[in-house]
Image: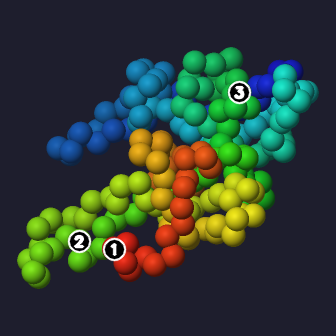
Amino acid sequence: MEALIDEYIVRTEHDSKKEKDLGNGQKIIIPGDWNPYEEDNYSHEGVVLSVPKGASDGELPPIEVGDTVYFLYTIVDNKLEGDKYRCDKNEIFAYKRDGKLYMVDGWNFIQPIEESEDQTKVNGIYIKSTPDKVERMGRVYACDEWMQEQEVRSGDVVMFRPDREYPMYVEGELVYRIRTIDIYGVVYEEEEAGIQ
């Protein structure tokens, strides 16, 4: 099977069976093709089997056969056969090659951050048992080339527009997929912002 234009062919584990703990000592096995839009039943990553020969707009990210790619969950609608799926180039946010993660231009992975201890208590009395996630702020997990040119690096805290974060797991870490145009600032004084 060979990709032609705009779409990659990837192998992913959408169809693999998932074990779900019911919390009472019992577990059930759920087929991956049952309720494919349920968060526990889809994957955000796959391995590239075939790259397109071209792009309708003339631009393809530098993704190669064998790279691991991170993509939008709607790939479940593009099943070819077995564990093979079509994945549009515009639905790929990052790729990993030789253990290194690269962002596709225009996309970034931002880790959520939690409130500092000072924000969970008043006058020394804890008002929350666990800290909440700080809204519209996160720590850069990986950023695209333009952000790097602006001297934004992994670990920097950034601010982003509301409701632009899309949660997904990358390398076992919860991250938000956020477009570069939705990130509007870098926080340099973390203590003043109440970030731990």
Q: Pick the residue in front: 22 or 68.
A: 68
Q: Quadrant of the C terminus?
A: bottom left
**Label 2: how many Cα within 10 Å (few below 14, some 14–19, many 20+):** some
Q: Pick the residue in front: 170 or 18.
A: 170
Residue at 71% over, 27% down: 88
Q: Nearer the viewer, mark 1 or mark 3?
A: 1
Q: Which mark is residue 194?
A: 1
Distance from disc 2 to disc 3, alpha carbons, whole Å, reads 42 Å
Residue 67 percent coordinates (x, y): 76, 46
Q: Are marks 2 and 1 in contact (CB under 8 Å)?
A: yes
Q: Is residue 87 visible?
A: yes
Distance from disc 2 to disc 1, alpha carbons, whole Å, reads 7 Å
Residue carrying label 3:
88
Q: Is residue 119 left or right of residue 74?
A: left
Find numbered disc 1 in the image and state the secondary structure of the residue it sits on: loop
**Label 1: how many Cα within 10 Å (few below 14, some 14–19, many 20+):** some
Q: Pick the residue in front: 2 or 139.
A: 139
Badge 2 amino acid = Gln
Q: Is residue 60 left or right of residue 148?
A: right
Q: Which callout, 2 or 3, points at the residue further toward the start of the chain?
A: 3
Residue at 64% over, 27% down: 83
Residue 174 percent coordinates (x, y): 46, 54
Badge 3 amino acid = Asp
Q: Nearer the viewer, mark 2 or mark 3?
A: 2
Q: In this rendering, is residue 186 above or below 3?
A: below
Residue carrying label 2:
119
Find numbered disc 3 in the image and state the secondary structure of the residue it sits on: strand
